[in-house]
């Protein structure tokens, strides 16, 4: 399963942006978005920024991903 991950744009270079996802910084392509600014919260999927989201949505998604990770880890521990 592939999922989009929320992050914050911290730098922009031509058609790419550096996005912070927790403590990881990755480079994502901006070609699918009309305007991206430093400080924007975005969804990154397969190396592309696919959508702008609010800070609240970003925080909620990260919490949900963390909960999902905890659940799947518990399943693996019990198998």
Image (cartoon, helix red, strand yellow):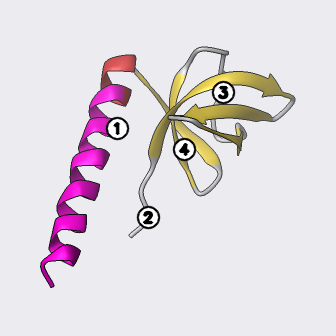
The reply to whether callout 1 and callout 2 are in contact (CB within 8 Å) is: no
Percent from the top left, x then y, of residue 72? 22, 66
Q: Kindly identify the residue that appears in the image at 45 percent across and 50 percent down.
A: 4
Q: CA distance from mark 2 to mark 3?
A: 24 Å
Q: Residues within 10 Å of mark 3 (few under 14, many from 20)?
A: few
The residue that disc 3 covers is 34
Residue 72 higher or lower than 35, as above or below = below
Kind of element beneath mark 4: strand
Magenta-span inclusion, residue 72: yes
The correct choice, above or below, for 53 with respect to 16 in the image is above
- Residue placed under numbered mark 4 in the picture: 44
Marks 4 and 1, how far apart at CA: 13 Å
Earlier-in-chain disc, 4 versus 1: 4
Q: Earlier in the sequence, mark 3 or mark 1?
A: 3
Identify the mark nearer the N-term, 3 or 4: 3
| Image quarter hosting the N terminus | bottom left
Q: Which residues are magenta?
A: 59-79
- Residue on which disc 1 sits: 62
């Amino acid at each position: 399963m592939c999922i989009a991950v929320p992050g914050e744009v911290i730098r922009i270079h031509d058609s790419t942006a550096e996005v912070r996802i927790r403590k990881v910084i990755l480079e994502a392509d901006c070609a699918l978005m009309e305007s991206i600014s430093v400080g924007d919260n975005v969804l990154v999927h397969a190396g592309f920024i696919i959508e702008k989201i609010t800070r609240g949505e970003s925080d909620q998604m990260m919490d949900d991903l963390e909960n999902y990770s905890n659940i799947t880890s518990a399943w693996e521990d019990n198998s």
